[in-house]
Image (spheres, helix red, strand yellow):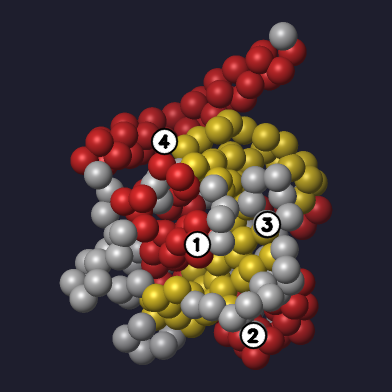
């Protein structure tokens, strides 16, 4: 990203990553044994050198990378990145294991949507692996809609894998970006959106693979007509 900016929300702040943040990557990811398929685009194994290379590659005019910092103690929690070179800009994110299940990833996705919208981006996309249901829930909570399953080639994840693609139209999401100035509140979702989210979560819990397989088949049929 060519300009310096940050986004502050009640519990976290997004700040552009710097080379020195490679140390934080190595501390949170260096000793983690995890399937490459869960975080295929991150360096693995993660060392300070490989993390610094990743940060530099994602600090360009077309790729914006931010560290996620907790406001109360300035701890580094993870990172969120946005690739604007794609036809529909794509975001990715990760949070270190000590900070899982605290809602930080969801807040970070909300915050980067504000950054994107402020710069005229009207639509965002994100992709997750089938087994990464926690990431899928983050996207659903942030208002993304499932678009279907698509194949992607990830050498670090043992070749071609199906991923679940989500997209969101930011022009229809004003309530997600409303700031709760001075209230300490998190961004809220309108009642209608809450009901839709509950229905999507039930579908995800019951038969995620079936939902996306059916969607992918519909897309394929549409494309062959």
Front-most of residues 170 and 43: 170
Residue 207 vs 184, above or below: the answer is above
CA gap, disc 3 and disc 1: 14 Å
For the residues labelled 3 and 2, say whether their Cβ atoms are less than 8 Å apart: no
Q: Is residue 136 visible?
A: no
Mark 3 or 4, nearer chain start: 3
Q: In the drawing, what numbered circle is on residue 18?
A: 2
Q: Which residue is mark 4?
A: 204
The quarter of the picture where the C terminus appears is top right
CA gap, disc 3 and disc 4: 28 Å
Mark 1 Cα-neighbour bin, 10 Å: few <14, some 14–19, many ≥20: few
Image quadrant in which you'd find residue 153 = top right
Q: Which residue is mark 3?
A: 84
Q: Which residue is mark 1?
A: 118
CA gap, disc 2 and disc 1: 22 Å
Residue 39 falls left or right of residue 141: right
Label 3 or label 4, whichever lies nearer to me, is 3
Image quadrant in which you'd find residue 102 = bottom left
For the residues labelled 1 and 4, say whether their Cβ atoms are less than 8 Å apart: no
Residue 158 vs 76, above or below: the answer is above
CA gap, disc 1 and disc 4: 31 Å
Mark 4 Cα-neighbour bin, 10 Å: few <14, some 14–19, many ≥20: some
Q: In the drawing, what numbered circle is on residue 158?
A: none
Mark 3 or 1, nearer chain start: 3
CA gap, disc 4 and disc 2: 36 Å
Mark 2 Cα-neighbour bin, 10 Å: few <14, some 14–19, many ≥20: some
CA gap, disc 3 and disc 2: 19 Å
Place of residue 112 in the rendered image (x, y in percent of width and height, measured from the top left): 49, 63
């Amino acid at each position: 990203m060519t300009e310096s900016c940050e986004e502050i929300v009640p519990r976290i702040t997004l700040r552009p990553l710097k080379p020195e943040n490679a140390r934080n990557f190595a501390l949170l990811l260096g000793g983690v044994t995890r399937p490459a398929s869960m975080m295929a685009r991150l360096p693995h194994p993660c060392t300070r050198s490989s993390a610094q290379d990743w940060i530099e590659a994602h600090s360009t005019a077309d790729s914006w990378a931010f560290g996620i910092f907790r406001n109360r103690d300035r701890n580094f929690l993870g990172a969120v990145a946005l690739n604007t070179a794609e036809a529909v800009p794509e975001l990715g994110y990760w949070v270190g294991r000590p900070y899982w299940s605290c809602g930080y990833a969801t807040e970070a996705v909300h915050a980067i949507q504000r950054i994107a919208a402020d710069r005229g981006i009207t639509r965002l996309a994100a992709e997750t692996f089938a087994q990464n249901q926690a990431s899928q829930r983050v996207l659903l909570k942030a208002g993304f809609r499932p678009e279907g399953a698509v194949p992607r080639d990830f050498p670090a994840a043992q070749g071609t894998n199906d991923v679940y693609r989500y997209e969101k139209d930011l022009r229809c999401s004003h309530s997600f970006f409303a700031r709760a100035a001075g209230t300490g509140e998190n961004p809220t979702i309108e009642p209608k959106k809450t009901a839709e989210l509950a229905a999507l979560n039930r579908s995800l819990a019951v038969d995620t693979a079936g939902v996306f397989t059916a969607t992918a088949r519909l897309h394929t049929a549409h494309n062959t007509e």
